[in-house]
Image (cartoon, helix red, strand yellow):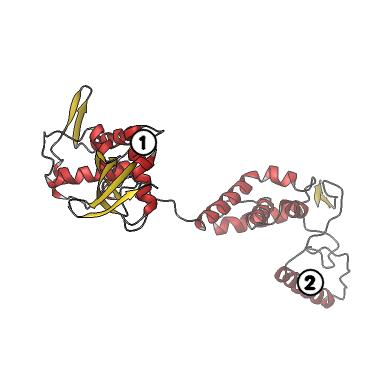
């Protein structure tokens, strides 16, 4: 409807197309009751209500629509009484945003609003509301996902839960320092000693020393042997249990700390300590092979070597292993 001077006239839509929209059952019930009451009033005046009558009209027979300004003013007064800062035109925006937020596809929303372009106009006009709905969807999805893991300080974790071989070796040395077996200002194990004792590479031994420095348990500088430092007060007051150092060879069940003596053609060429299962031939073979290569080079024949196996600190021989 449009107002032309004092006259009110019916006009077409912006796209000059007729369109129908669906109504919910409650709205249909309200309109049906409204028309029935109107029919009753019109009949009392001896008139009839035609099928072409306007739904809202101030004339008895509904032949003329109410003026647009009348509806706008009445809606404005109602909103003012309710304390709502709005206009009747914003009902259109309310309808669109509620439908989009509820998940109705933009094409359907655009059809109800009379937008052309298959929903593109609707998305352009109400893009902010689409983004808000999308954000709510993202937040809802996040609640269905597992919680993020708590970040763990690797250096602190290695004190009580060592995982890598160098962490386990460093944890064992840390325990010796906290227990007093390695006194403050006494020489700390060198990288060479760590390599030979635990049968590890130079890189692993270097990482052991660096981790001990991170823990402020040893002091090392170029050209000087590392020395043990006095443990921080909190370390002494609250010593944590640690796992004994493990060599890379210990990956089976029943592993324990072993004293190992390597013989080449009957001559004792090396003594070292490592953790392994004494009854696991695969682990003993790996220990023997690695130790033999460290002694004679990568082309050495492991068959020339034997490995005496004893539990750490014990004199009793468990077994003599040979790579046949």
* Extreme residue in the front direction: 265
Residue depicted at 84% across the width and 77% down the height: 43
Q: List the residue tagged with mark 1.
A: 293
Classify mark 2: helix, strand or loop.
Answer: helix
User: Is residue 234 visible in the rendered structure shown here?
Assistant: no
* Extreme residue in the top direction: 223
Return the disc, 1 or 2, that comes first in the chain's sequence: 2
Count residues near mark 2 (Cα–Cα under 10 Å), then give few for <14, some for 14-19, many for 20+.
some
Left or right of 61? Residue 120 is left
User: Is residue 175 visible in the rendered structure shown here?
Assistant: yes
Position of residue 176 measured from the top left corner of the image (x, y, whole percent): 17, 45
Quarter occupied by residue 18: bottom right
Q: Depth check: give the residue in front, 52 or 170.
A: 170
Left or right of 281? Residue 28 is right
- Is 194 situated above or below 74? above
The dot on residue 35 is 2
Q: CA distance from mark 1 to mark 2?
A: 102 Å
Residue depicted at 50% across the width and 57% down the height: 143
Quarter occupied by residue 38: bottom right
Position of residue 116 measured from the top left corner of the image (x, y, whole percent): 80, 46
Left or right of 25? Residue 20 is right
Position of residue 100 measured from the top left corner of the image (x, y, whole percent): 66, 54
Q: Depth check: give the residue in front, 149 or 164.
A: 164
Residue depicted at 21% across the width and 28% down the height: 220
Quarter occupied by residue 155: top left
Q: Depth check: give the residue in front, 243 or 246.
A: 246
Mark in the foreground, 1 or 2 = 1
Classify mark 1: helix, strand or loop.
Answer: helix
């Amino acid at each position: 409807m449009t107002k032309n001077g004092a006259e009110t006239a019916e006009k077409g839509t912006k796209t000059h197309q007729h369109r129908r929209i669906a109504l919910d059952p409650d709205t249909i019930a309200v309109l049906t009751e409204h028309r029935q009451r109107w029919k009753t009033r019109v009949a009392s005046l001896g008139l009839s209500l035609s099928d072409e009558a306007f739904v809202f009209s101030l004339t008895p027979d509904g032949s003329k629509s109410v003026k647009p300004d009348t509806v706008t003013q009445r809606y404005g007064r109602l909103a003012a009484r309710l304390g709502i800062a709005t206009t009747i035109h914003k009902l259109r925006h309310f309808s669109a945003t509620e439908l989009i937020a509820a998940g109705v596809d933009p094409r359907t929303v655009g059809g109800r609003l009379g937008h052309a372009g298959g929903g593109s106009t609707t998305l352009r006009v109400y893009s902010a509301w689409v983004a808000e709905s999308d954000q709510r969807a993202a937040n809802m999805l996040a609640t269905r996902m597992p919680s993020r893991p708590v970040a763990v300080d690797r250096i602190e974790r290695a004190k009580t839960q060592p995982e890598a071989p160098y962490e386990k070796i460093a944890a064992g040395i840390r325990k010796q320092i906290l227990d007093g077996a390695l006194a403050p200002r006494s020489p700390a194990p060198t990288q060479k000693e760590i390599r030979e004792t635990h049968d590890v590479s130079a890189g692993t031994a270097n990482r052991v020393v660096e981790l001990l420095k991170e823990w402020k348990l040893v002091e090392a500088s170029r050209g000087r042997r590392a020395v043990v430092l006095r443990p921080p007060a909190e370390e002494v007051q609250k010593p944590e249990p640690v796992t004994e150092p493990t060599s890379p060879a210990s990956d089976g069940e029943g592993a324990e700390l072993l004293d190992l003596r390597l013989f080449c053609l009957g001559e004792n060429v090396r003594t070292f300590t490592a953790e392994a299962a004494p009854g696991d031939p695969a682990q003993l073979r790996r220990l023997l092979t690695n130790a033999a290569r460290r002694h004679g080079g990568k082309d050495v024949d492991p068959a020339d070597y034997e490995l005496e196996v004893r539990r750490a600190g014990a004199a009793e021989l468990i077994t003599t292993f040979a790579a046949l």
